[in-house]
Image (cartoon, helix red, strand yellow):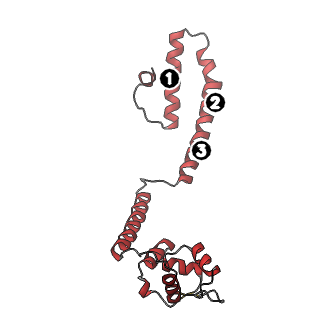
Amino acid sequence: MSEPQQVILQQMIEPSQWPKWAKNPSVAARITGVHRSTLYEHKAVGCAAFKASGKVQLHQYREWLSKQGRKVAEPKSLLDARLKLLLAQIARVERANSVAARELVNAGEAAALVGQMCVKARAILFSRLVDELPCRLAGLAAEAIRVETRKLFDEIMELLAVPDFGDVESNTG
């Protein structure tokens, strides 16, 4: 059981059903719903529920709180706690299913794929634009240069396996 689930389940326990002892103030905080720093403050002002071994006698602590005029936070109802736990489990299962169905991807995997694509794109662009294009365009008129650069653009997109989303010129202009 995960830490958040343990906290939810322990907060469901009514004070009358608390175990006799908590092995340390952190565990006592989870069971009582009282923040750990508050427990340490209570220990510092002389609450006898805190033992030298580190254990906390929970019923004695509850009695001390009532004598001090303080109340333990009301625990969540069992139904609310179960609902919260179920919702967390559903969210975890839905996320796992989305990852399995490839609806979500691991950020590291995506970054590696994009990096590989960028390396490939750079090599293709450099080769085509720096090495091949000047030879293709030598001595051509403006309209012929436009036609050749469009052909080269289409070749590069095909090599990069980029889908055609319509006329690029009409989308940009």
Q: Residues within 10 Å of mark 3 (few under 14, many from 20)?
A: few
Q: Nearer the viewer, residue 127 or 76?
A: 76
Q: Residues within 10 Å of mark 2 (few under 14, many from 20)?
A: few
* Three-letter amino acid code at the position of disc 1: Lys
- Residue 144, above or below 43: above
First of labels 3, 1 by sequence position: 3
Q: Which residue is mark 3?
A: 115
Taking the spot 38% from the left edge, 73% from the top edge, the residue there is: 81
Front position among marks 3 and 1: 3
Q: Locate residue 95, reporting x and y percent.
A: 42, 60
Q: Residues within 10 Å of mark 1 (few under 14, many from 20)?
A: few
Q: Locate residue 50, reporting x and y percent.
A: 60, 86
Kindly indicate the quadrant of the structure image that contains residue 73.
bottom left
Kindly report the distance in space between the C-alpha atoms of the residues bearing marks 3 and 1.
26 Å
First of labels 2, 3 by sequence position: 3
Taking the spot 51% from the left edge, 73% from the top edge, the residue there is: 3
Q: Which residue is mark 2?
A: 126
Kindly indicate the quadrant of the structure image that contains residue 44.
bottom right
* Three-letter amino acid code at the position of disc 2: Phe
Q: Which residue is mark 1?
A: 151
Q: Secondary structure at mark 3?
A: helix
Q: Locate residue 79, reporting x and y percent.
A: 33, 74
Q: Which mark is residue 166?
A: none
Q: Nearer the viewer, residue 54 or 161?
A: 54
Taking the spot 49% from the left edge, 33% from the top edge, the residue there is: 158
Q: Secondary structure at mark 1?
A: helix
Q: Nearer the viewer, residue 37 or 106?
A: 37
Q: Locate residue 71, reporting x and y percent.
A: 46, 77
Kindly report the distance in space between the C-alpha atoms of the residues bearing marks 1 and 2.
16 Å
* Three-letter amino acid code at the position of disc 3: Gly
